[in-house]
Image (cartoon, rainbow, N blue to C red):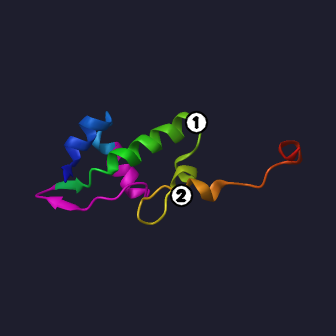
Amino acid sequence: MLDISEVAQRAGLPASTLRYYEEKGLIMSTGRRGIKRLFAPVVLDQLALIALGRAAGFSLDEIGAMFDARGEPQICLLYTSPSPRDRG
């Protein structure tokens, strides 16, 4: 488990951003060590995907819709049928 300061350092984000992302449901802590939140190492992958989504212009709400309740990416849910131009 990684505490919030370790995650913040590795992800290059302030702890306040991690708390905000948790409040928005984008990441989940797994518990606490004293007053510090703990996160599973997979949170670093989730944060990388969030950063990628932000760089691509997605809002946090749109990025949140790309994850299931366990925090697993569900990118395939965004697939739409091909346009007539693509079928062609």
Residue ranking furthest to the bottom: 69
The magenta stretch spans which residues?
17-35
Q: Is residue 13 magenta?
A: no
Image coordinates for residue 8, horizontal then vertical, percent: 27, 40
- Residue at 84%, 48% (x, y): give it: 83
**On the picture, is 14 further left or further right than 36?**
right
Does 48 appear above or below 36?
above
Residue to which mark 1 is pinned: 56
Q: Quadrant of residue 9?
A: top left
Residue 56, percent across and down? 58, 36
Q: Residue at x 26, y 55 (%)?
A: 40
Residue at x 20% of width, y 42% of height: 5
Q: Whole-Å distance between the Cαs marked 1 and 2?
A: 17 Å
Q: Amino acid at mark 1?
A: Ala
Image quarter hosting the C terminus: top right
Answer whether labels 1 and 2 touch (C-beta < 8 Å).
Answer: no
**Quarter of the figure with the N terminus:** bottom left
Which mark is nearer the camera, 1 or 2?
A: 2
Q: Which residue has dot 2 on it? A: 74
